Amino acid sequence: MLIRYKKAFEKIAMGLLSFMPNEKDIKKLKETIHSYENDDNWVLYLWKKNDEYIGIVGLVTDCNSMATIQHVSVVPSYRGEGVAKEMLQEVADLGQYESVRATEETRNIVQKCINCIDEEADDH
């Protein structure tokens, strides 16, 4: 289940973001969280499964309803179970964004997830 970030989730969010290669430094993590808390164009969602937060997806939006996926991270013990795909599918299902794109850092995981979603659609 996708849950919008709020300040009470700060430590959980920082822990999930720390799995991103460019978010290892605590100072960088704090700057990133600060941006999600204070910039209206930065939107952060946590993924909750069985009362546990196991993933995170962060977007930056522009005035044209274009969202850029800045962060996608899943707890290592849950990787390979389709969690990132579920998160991205639910973000798309929100209907708030006309289009969604990836950054260079998130491109591989986003493309992999989108290909899985497309393949599932073809199976039906």
Image (cartoon, rainbow, N blue to C red):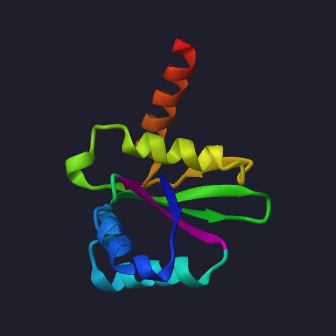
83 within the magenta span:
no
Magenta residues span: 41-49
Q: Quadrant of residue 65?
A: bottom right
> Is residue 97 placed above or below 60 in the rendered structure?
above
Chief secondary structure of the magenta portion: strand
Residue extending farthest to the top is 123
Q: Is residue 72 visible?
A: no
User: Where, quadrant-wise, is the C terminus in this rendering?
Assistant: top right
Percent position (x, y) of residue 79? 27, 44
- Which residue shows up at 51% across the image and 35% down it? 114
Residue at image location 54% in from the left, 41% down from the top: 89
Examine the image and state in which quarter residue 118 appears: top right
Residue 29 image point, x, y percent: 36, 78
Please, is residue 100 above or below residue 21 in the view? Answer: above
- In the displayed structure image, the side of residue 52 where residue 123 appears, left or right: right
- The reply to whether the magenta stretch includes residue 47 is yes
Q: Which of 73 and 51 is in front in this view?
A: 51
